[in-house]
């Protein structure tokens, strides 16, 4: 069972405070209840508790690279979450295609080809080059899982994490213990930032 997000986040921020204070300075204040309500209203469906708990710890980061707690991705502030989702959905047009309707009926965690963004996908992080992490809010036992959107290949793999609580937990283990996460190892730079080095 994943730790509650605040336990993992406290481990990350304690390490950043000591080793990478400039990275810690990019972390935004917690999201307000009004901002969280905006997400719930936009989605029109339940938003996972672990994602809400994460936003109540930090509303994304204010600068790139702001790489904790997801290697190579920047956690998005809620304002950018809303804007990114609207942008990604704009390519669908007012009338969803039969393929979109079919995919919306598939269980959460089901991958597909390229060229679609489903209304049930909630973006939470971006590499700012066309790749996104999103929470899949479709039905099924994997509801709330975290998946990766590739601008070239779409969603071609299954879930990366069962939920957002698993991301900071794994990141905390890697950061504090000098381990590896998604083929990358964290290290503090001379400038006090956190970077993830591949290999």
Image (tube, grey):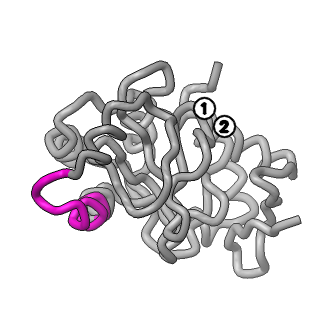
The answer to whether the residues at label 2 and label 1 have Cβ atoms under 8 Å apart is: yes
**First along the sequence among labels 2 and 1:** 1
Observer-nearest of 14 and 174: 174
Question: Which residue is tagged 1?
Answer: 7
Magenta stretch bounds:
84-96
Q: Main secondary structure of the magenta part?
A: helix
- Looking at the image, which residue is at 52% across and 44% down? 111
**Residue 12 drawn at (x, y percent):** 66, 48
* Quadrant of the drawing holding the N terminus: top right
Q: Is residue 20 above or below residue 16?
A: below
Disc 1 on helix, strand or loop?
Answer: helix
Q: Position of residue 77 (x, y in %)?
A: 36, 59
Give how far across and how far down residue 87 sits, in percent.
Answer: 26, 67
Which quarter shows the C terminus?
A: bottom right
Circle 2 SS class: helix
* Residue corresponding to mark 2: 169
Of marks 2 and 1, the one in the foreground: 2
Q: Who is closer to the viewer here, 97 or 93?
A: 97
Graded by Cα atoms within 10 Å as few (under 14), some (14 to 19) or many (20 or more), the crowding at tag 2 reads many
């Amino acid at each position: 069972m994943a730790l509650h997000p605040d336990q993992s986040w406290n481990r990350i921020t304690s390490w950043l405070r000591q080793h990478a204070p400039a990275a810690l300075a990019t972390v935004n204040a917690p999201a307000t209840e009004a901002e969280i309500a905006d997400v719930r209203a936009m989605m029109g469906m339940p938003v996972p508790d672990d994602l809400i708990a994460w936003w109540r710890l930090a509303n994304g980061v204010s600068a790139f690279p702001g790489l904790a707690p997801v290697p190579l991705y920047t956690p998005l502030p809620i304002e950018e979450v809303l804007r990114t989702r609207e942008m990604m959905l704009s390519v669908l047009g007012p009338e969803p295609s039969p393929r979109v309707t079919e995919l919306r009926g598939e269980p959460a965690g089901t991958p597909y080809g390229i060229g679609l963004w489903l209304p049930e996908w909630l973006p939470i992080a971006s590499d700012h080059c066309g790749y996104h992490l999103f929470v899949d809010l479709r039905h099924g036992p994997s509801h709330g899982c975290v998946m990766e959107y590739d601008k070239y290949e779409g969603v071609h793999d299954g879930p990366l994490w069962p939920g957002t609580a698993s991301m900071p937990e794994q990141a905390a283990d890697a950061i504090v213990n000098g381990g590896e996460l998604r083929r990358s190892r964290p290290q503090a730079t001379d400038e006090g930032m956190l970077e993830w080095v591949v290999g």
